[in-house]
Amino acid sequence: MVVLAAAPSPAPMKAESIAVAQGIPLYFLLKILADLRAAQLVTSRRGQAGGYALARPADEVAVADIIRAVEGPLADVHGTSPELLKFAPPATPLRDVWIATRAALRDVLEVTTLADIVAGQLPASVTRELARPGAERRRPSP
C-alpha cells in the first residue's frame, strides 16, 4: 500500500513490480492484494495498462484499515474480541489488558495514514509515543 501511495503516477502498478521492489513473493502479494481489493482499499485493472492502484486518496487510508483487511480485528485473541474473553482467577485482569492493548493499537494505527508514512511525517500522537523513555528498547520479558 505504501508503494502504491508513493508512486509518482496514479497509473496502476503491476503486482510483479511491487513484489520485486519490496522483496515479497508474488503469490503471497497477490493474496494480500485480493484481500485489499475485497476491502475496497485498492482497485485492479486487467490488461497491458493494468495493475493495482489505491481506491481512495492516501490521506484517507489508515494503517488500521489495511491491517483489518489483511489480518482481521486489531487485537483479537484466537478470534475472540477482548470484551468476550473470560479468564479464571488470578488471570481475570488479562481481559482488561487485552482491551487496553487494542486501545493502544488504535491510538497509533487509526490516526496514521498512508500519506503520513509516504511524507515521513507521523502524527504528533505517534511521535510522542516514540519519544517516551525506552520506546525503542521496550521488549517483552522472557
Image (tube, rainbow, N blue to C red):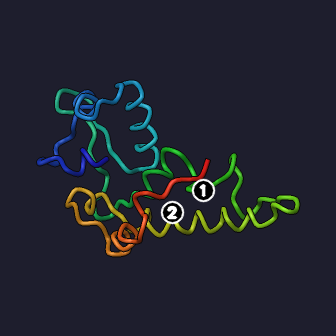
Secondary structure beneath dot 2 equals helix
Relative image position of residue 22 (x, y in whole percent): 27, 35
Badge 2 crowding class, 10 Å Cα cut-off, few under 14, some 14 to 19, many 20 or more, is few
In this rendering, would 12 be left or right of 79? left
Residue holding disc 1: 75
The one nearer the camera, 99 or 134, is 134
Number of the label disc, if any, that sits on residue 93: none
Relative image position of residue 2 (x, y in whole percent): 28, 49
The one nearer the camera, 44 or 17, is 17
34 w.r.t. 100: above or below: above
Residue occupying the far left of the picture = 8
Q: Which residue appears at 48% of the width and 58% of the height?
A: 138
16 w.r.t. 100: above or below: above
In this rendering, would 35 be left or right of 97? left
In this rendering, would 28 be left or right of 84? left
Number of the label disc, if any, that sits on residue 105: 2
7 w.r.t. 32: above or below: below
Q: Which residue appears at 27% of the width and 36% of the height?
A: 45
Secondary structure beneath dot 1 equals loop
Q: Amino acid at mark 2?
A: Leu
Q: Is tag 2's residue or tag 1's residue first in the polypeptide sequence?
A: 1
Asked whether the beta carbons under mark 2 and mark 1 sit within 8 Å of each other, the answer is yes
